[in-house]
Amino acid sequence: MITVISSTNRNNALSLQIAEYYLQLLKEKGADCQLLDLRDLPVDFIETALYDNKGNNPEFNVFQDKILKSEKLVFIIPEYNGSFPGVLKAFIDGLAFPKSFKGKKAAVVGISAGDQGAALAMSHLVDILNYLGVHVLAKRPRLPNADNEFEDGTFSNPRYDQRLRQQVEELLVF
Amino acid sequence: MITVISSTNRNNALSLQIAEYYLQLLKEKGADCQLLDLRDLPVDFIETALYDNKGNNPEFNVFQDKILKSEKLVFIIPEYNGSFPGVLKAFIDGLAFPKSFKGKKAAVVGISAGDQGAALAMSHLVDILNYLGVHVLAKRPRLPNADNEFEDGTFSNPRYDQRLRQQVEELLVF
Amino acid sequence: MITVISSTNRNNALSLQIAEYYLQLLKEKGADCQLLDLRDLPVDFIETALYDNKGNNPEFNVFQDKILKSEKLVFIIPEYNGSFPGVLKAFIDGLAFPKSFKGKKAAVVGISAGDQGAALAMSHLVDILNYLGVHVLAKRPRLPNADNEFEDGTFSNPRYDQRLRQQVEELLVF
Amino acid sequence: MITVISSTNRNNALSLQIAEYYLQLLKEKGADCQLLDLRDLPVDFIETALYDNKGNNPEFNVFQDKILKSEKLVFIIPEYNGSFPGVLKAFIDGLAFPKSFKGKKAAVVGISAGDQGAALAMSHLVDILNYLGVHVLAKRPRLPNADNEFEDGTFSNPRYDQRLRQQVEELLVF
């Protein structure tokens, strides 16, 4: 099972649309895959699902179970304040360790409204994933100015489309 | 005003004790300073104080006001999963930009139960702070195995104490 | 004294041209400044000026002296292989520590032929500079696709010009 | 072929001793492996083997050929000035791209005289390797204060020995 994570809880996020597009690409290849949308996290999970409360929030545990069932994770990462959304790391902080992560494989995709393309966000997340025992695919596609390159559920910029398709090919054999 | 931030919402965190010790060091030097304890954040702030709801949560705004009044920020950073707590970044994501940050000065302190001393956590946070326009003091004290080196409100390890005292001296003239 | 470092030893590097432009901006503001061009490093300095041979190469010592006389350093950094040129770090490895660095101020500028703008290169260098005790200006201008935006000794892209002029203003009062 | 790289050109480096120990561990497992000692690089390679001179230095090409023949690379990285030695990156800058790197696998080991264990050095190198298309094993063993933990060609600290043996196991099936 490959889980594609829309890494923000913001409404109307481009990340979610790109996550859905990524799922399509995976399905075209016949991969077993599912979406994980951080917008659906319980709004108080930083209190009710972290630290001493790990495992106690049934709504959060739905997310936990999806992660446990996954062999591979794909993080669609919007750039917020020069890195990834804090909510993504708080979510990771709430997951059981090491069973959620150790020995798994992951891919990261960086999207931004500005022209950096979440390069630092992806670097930070790779450090964290490696720390958790997750092997990360070398290719880290950057999609700067993504707002202008994606519409009606697909990329208007064919190079962006190509970057994701190549990553999908590599992820399937990683 | 110098604000010392205990960068986690976990109960009984060593970060909070070290933040309180840091405040003492600042007060000994006659500095105007205050504590900001992320444990007191509203438990649903990731929904009620971020994105379209920025500025709408009065409890969160107490934090926002403390940041606005600060010229300098000190981040006491515990290492979680190879970086800083997600809650810290979510908190930053909720603050008004650029007025909360631009042109301000900051110092970072890394603490860990393990032997890394939050080196990567501090590197990640410096990237973010620089992105927000915050100048960061070069000295980034690492306090690995901090649980064993701090008790009854003070450092049993005099080298750790020394690292913080030197940073305080430098921060005051930064 | 502010020293502007063209951070590569490659011939015909755009970094050198931009370093020279940066010097002009500093001179317009009346700043005392000088160029340091890594192309002029002795070709065998990794053997004759590092480790046990520190201080033994008179040609390298000319560089060392320029650094010692500087209060502020500006690194014009081309992106090579996802980071800064190895020669830059080898140069740093040959300088006397801590007197070359401790307590000094620095600014970094990232240039690239591709669209990343040396974001990771600057992040890596800031880690190193902070380790050496150098305070780094928050603003890290990125100049992606720089080859297309600079000609005849000046920027054809006014936003790039503006980024450097703003950094110069901030550096002078940092 | 697995190539173990002693990532410095410093004489009497602990990195070289640990690289040799690592080779032993690989040989015990029956792996085909070889050493690459950066001390043997031509002393003027930053001039005679980089940029327009890529491929022109026969001595450097011996290194180039060893890399081309490798499927997996192991970097034994000493911490210099808060990162890896500049010579390592200059070496990488001299190698043919993409054929030296793309699609290969790597592992990193961090050693330091101080207590950081080259955490930042490894983070920086992973960014570079990923940029070059090299997949990096998640486990990044840190060996702080390594001088005190290794003597007569072996680890006096059994935990350090264990860290490398586990990495070897994982690398062989990566």
Image (cartoon, coloured by chain):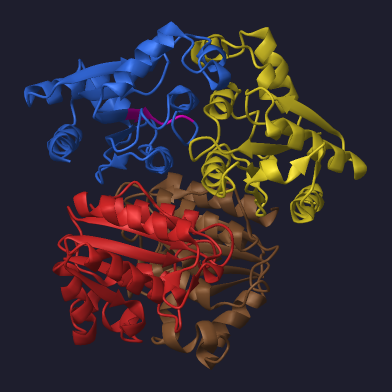
Chain colours: A blue, B yellow, C brown, D red
Q: Quadrant of the N terminus of chain A?
A: top left
Q: Is residue D118 visible?
A: yes
- The percent coordinates of residue A15 (x first, y second) are 32, 22
Indicate the position of residue B132 as horizontal and vertical percent values.
57, 36
Residue at image point 48% right, 49% down: C141
Up/down of C11 relative to D25, above or below:
below
Residue A11 seen in render: no
Q: Which of D97 and B52 lies nearest the eye of the viewer?
A: D97
* B92 relative to A156 in the view: left or right: right
Query: What residue is at 36 percent from the left and 82 percent from the top?
Result: D39
Magenta highlight on residue A79: yes
**Quadrant of the image occupied by residue C81:** bottom left
Over which residues does the magenta segment extend?
A76-80
Relative vertical location of residue A154 with respect to residue C7 in this rendering, above or below: above
- A106 in relation to A18, above or below: below
Taking depth in this image into account, of D147 and A119 the one nearest to the observer is D147
Residue C72: say if magenta.
Answer: no
Q: Residue at x 29, y 65 (%)?
A: D25
Question: x, y (%) of residue D69?
Answer: 13, 68
Q: Is residue B83 above or below residue D37?
A: above
- Residue at horizontal 34%, vertical 64%? D75
- From the viewer's perspective, tell me whether residue B98 is left or right of residue A6: right
How far across and how far down the image is residue B129, in percent? 58, 39
